[in-house]
Amino acid sequence: MPLALITGASAGIGRCFAEALARRGYDLILVARSTARIEALGRELSERHQVRAEAWTADLASDAGREDVAARIAALPRLDLLVNNAGFATTGKLQKIPLGPQMDMLRVHVMTPMRLCHAALPRMVEHGAGAIINVSSIAGFLFGPGNVNYSATKAYLTSFSLGLDTEVRSAGVRVQALCPGFTHTEIHTEMPHIKRQIPAWMWGKAEHVVETSLRQLERNGAVICVPGLLNKVLWRVLTMIPRGLRGTLAVRRKRSSG
Ligand SMILES: NC(=O)c1ccc[n+]([C@@H]2O[C@H](COP(=O)([O-])OP(=O)(O)OC[C@H]3O[C@@H](n4cnc5c(N)ncnc54)[C@H](OP(=O)(O)O)[C@@H]3O)[C@@H](O)[C@H]2O)c1
């Protein structure tokens, strides 16, 4: 049976990855802080799909949690798929919001995926097979007030994935930067205004994000995966606008909308 490790498997997109991969016959390692949730999900998926599931509790914002997961990955005889999905969002101008969560964001969105790729890759390259999905965001192509650290961490993750692909593709390892748009999950629970501000037609389902990602990976598609037609159009348009101008337009839009 192939083996997949998913960070942030207790909710949202990560939970959907666990379900979709169990349906495909993967054994699972589920990583998150909420032990009870990943243990319950593991039991449920084991019973339903006859796969094996382990729960590894870890706070990936802490050096100890990240290093523990990295060491356990390095000790695995084989890992077929690593899904670096754990993440969270905040809102507000950088100068006005608490520093702690912004530092944690760098640890969870930047340091952890890089560290876990570093731990997983030697075995994947040795076997000449394996895949890594880094869950980035369409926000990584955007510049605008109110979300700068989130966007910047996701820009890193997309750029990191594109570069990593050039290093490992010839060794048989595939890398994907998954860049969803607004998706119904728990990430916006603490930010109800986002749900009010963003029109309903801009929101997608986590199941669709995950199926698009896995299908693109299975057919050995492009490194960047943007689920949903609307998001694809937005992404194409954004990448045609010079980077400097993208920020200026966002500020003008914000001013004109008050
Ligand atoms: N939803 C969207 O609109 C959207 C759009 C683009 C990209 N994304 C990206 O998709 C990924 C998944 O987000 P989601 O929308 O599915 O959010 P979610 O429903 O809130 O799930 C986030 C997951 O990350 C885990 N996590 C958060 N901080 C962690 C930490 N310090 N250590 C370990 N695990 C941690 C959470 O588990 P515990 O709380 O149990 O630790 C949870 O399983 C994120 O990287 C996010 O940036 C989301």
Image: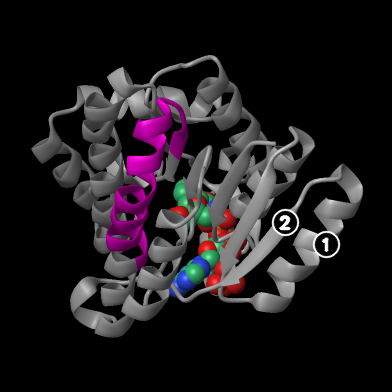
Tell me if residue 188 can be seen. no
State which quarter of the image contains the N terminus. Answer: top right
- The residue range painted magenta reads 108-132
Placement of 216 over or under 49, stated as above or below: above
Q: Amino acid at mark 2?
A: Ala
Q: Secondary structure at mark 1?
A: helix
Coordinates of residue 149 in the picture (x, y in percent) = 25, 62
Coordinates of residue 65 in the picture (x, y in percent) = 42, 76
Residue at position x 72%, y 56% in the image: 53
Colour style of the rendered protein structure: one colour
What distance separates the C-alpha of mark 1 from that of mark 2?
Answer: 7 Å
Of the pair 50 and 217, the residue shown nearer to us: 50
Q: Secondary structure at mark 2?
A: strand
Coordinates of residue 232 in the picture (x, y in percent) = 44, 24
Tell me if residue 73 can be seen. yes
Would you say the residues marked 1 and 2 are in contact, meaning their CB atoms lie under 8 Å apart?
Answer: yes
Q: Residue furthest right?
A: 47
Q: Which residue carries the number 1 mark?
A: 43
Question: Tag on residue 53?
Answer: 2
Placement of 109 over or under 190, stated as above or below: above
